Amino acid sequence: MGNRRHVAERRKTGPAVIGGVIAAVVVGAAGVGAWALAGDGTDSDGAHTTSGAVKKAKTGPLSAAEVTSAAQRFLTAWQGGELAGAAEATDAAAPAKALLTAYGKDARTEGLTLTPGTPVGAKVPFSVKATVVHDRTRAPLAYDSALTVVRRDGDGEPRVDWTPAVLHPDLAEGDRLVTGEAGDPPIEAVDRDGGALTAAKYPSLGTVLDGLREKYGKRAGGTAGVELRVVRGKASKAKKLSDKTLLELSEGTPGTVKTTLDPALQAAAEKQVARRARSSVVLTRASTGEILAVANSGHGFNTGFQGSLAPGSTMKVLTSSLLIEKGLASADKPHPCPKYSSYGGWKFQNDDKFSIKGGTFKASFARSCNTAFISRAGKLADDDLTRQAQEVFGLGRDDWAIGVPSFDGAVPVQSAAQKAASLIGQGGVRMNPLNMASVSATVRSGAFHQPYLVAPSVDGRTLATASRKMSAGTLAQLRELMAYTADYGTAAEAMAGVPGDTGAKTGSAEVDGQKKPNGWFTAYRDDLAAAAVVQAGGHGGDTAGPIVAALLKAGG
């Protein structure tokens, strides 16, 4: 009797009803369409094997009956809340049980109903319906998924090939489904006049609005909504996948955050960058640092605030202030501009290898002569440019607090050839349009005013300050250089028709592996200061210049 096989007793009752789906007989070889879920939890062959018998591992292609039976066993157990049994029906019981358990506990699902579809080979599609519950908030959840049946290593038994995507198609290894508060409470960002700022109206502001919500959501008076979302694990984050909202149970109540953006100028900025690929622009009020507009042609990354790019010859505004202060250059005095100039083992040249014979420093600045600056590298200490950037222009100290994430520029201490390259905005110097708009604003106003998007009074933060100002003589010469460039130099064509007290500087920055340089342009008009970059666009006067000029005109 001990070696006798025990066959499960057939039920004499009618078909079972599980989760609202009526059980039906599983058809073997053909594998009919949507079969229902029922089962007694026995192995896929419906029998128990005696202890001591050696069972030969199953091999060969899976039959339709094996696929259907293995899938039914898994889905029936999962729907019925027998999570250990569902996990055992897979080829990875431990991780399957952990994620299936979390589905009810963390995702807060109830009333699970699983409806299988027609198998296609070893793959079985199925639909999922449930209710997500959070406190008194309830919402229906419905989606489609699929599983694949394989032979388990070792004994060859049919089992569900476990991956997190079986639970939900958006899940990868290490991801979880979580129902809870939707991060920071929502905000309603408004412009300086109180008008709503939305990504639909101003496409460039998507990342800015995200940054405002992250910083001010909890203090703006709003309440967070509730959502079911995919919380990414390390593997997904390494692939730069963000958490994903699958179901919104409640929207939450937004708080209001007022910004310094000007609606008309923001609209103008959006229009300008839409005309040129890979372009970014920032416009500020020079006397206060208020950011009036920011726009990027690409909406996935805010290059205007967070970009880190070599600024090319626009850096010569800052370098000129240093040379003038140290008596190494003077606007109207003769200044050499040869075709070539070598320093630190590198040979530098001007664009198209031009030279200026008997010219002044003003002429060299206006035509953007590289060698006029490189020739002074040997008379500067390695940290002179870094200190000038930090102490006078407030750059490269990592202490700006504009209201959303930003990069404050970088002017590292460098030596030899790299020091020389930094003088013309190459080497290790890195900037973005916000930084370069601030440089022009410092020249126009006579002092550094840290740019900001949200007034410091909103959250009591302290704005960055510079430790010193340029002398009156240096400032006057620097304004003369920029004004001359706007009227007669490389910026003249773009700045034509811009009224008022103006100044400008063009720039082109070479980038390895890029056929065309990044085009830069920074300028001021009365109390407005702006800067733009067009990546891989070519010369700044032709590409970034028209963007800046259009905004300066619109600001009138």
Image (cartoon, grey):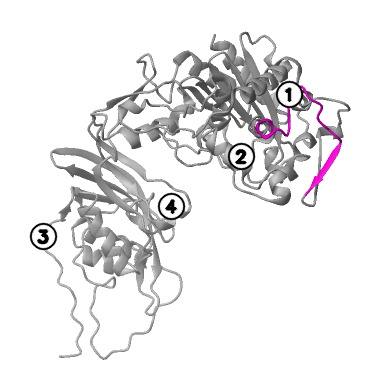
Residue drawn at 35 percent across, 74 percent down: 157
**Disc nearer the start of the sequence (3/1):** 3
Between the residue at mark 3 and the residue at mark 4, the CA separation in whole angstroms equals 52 Å
**Residue sitting at the far right:** 357
**Number of marks:** 4
State yes or no: residue 329 in magenta. Answer: yes
Q: Which residues are magenta?
A: 323-343
User: Which mark's residue is nearer the viewer, 3 or 4?
Assistant: 4
Q: Which residue is mark 2?
A: 309
- Residue 211's tag is none
Q: Which residue is mark 1?
A: 331
Q: Residue at x 29, y 41 (%)?
A: 183
Name the foreground residue: 353 vs 333: 333
Q: Which mark is residue 13?
A: 3
Spatial CA span between label 2 and label 1: 28 Å
Circle 4: element type: helix
* Mark-to-mark CA distance, 1 and 4: 53 Å
Q: Quarter-wise, where is residue 452 in the image?
A: top left
- Per the image, is 192 magenta? no
Residue 468, compared with residue 51, is above or below; it is above
Give the crowd class for mark 4: few <14, some 14-19, many >=20 residues within 10 Å. Answer: some
- Indicate left or right for 144 with 545 as reference: left
Name the residue that disc number 4 marks. Answer: 237
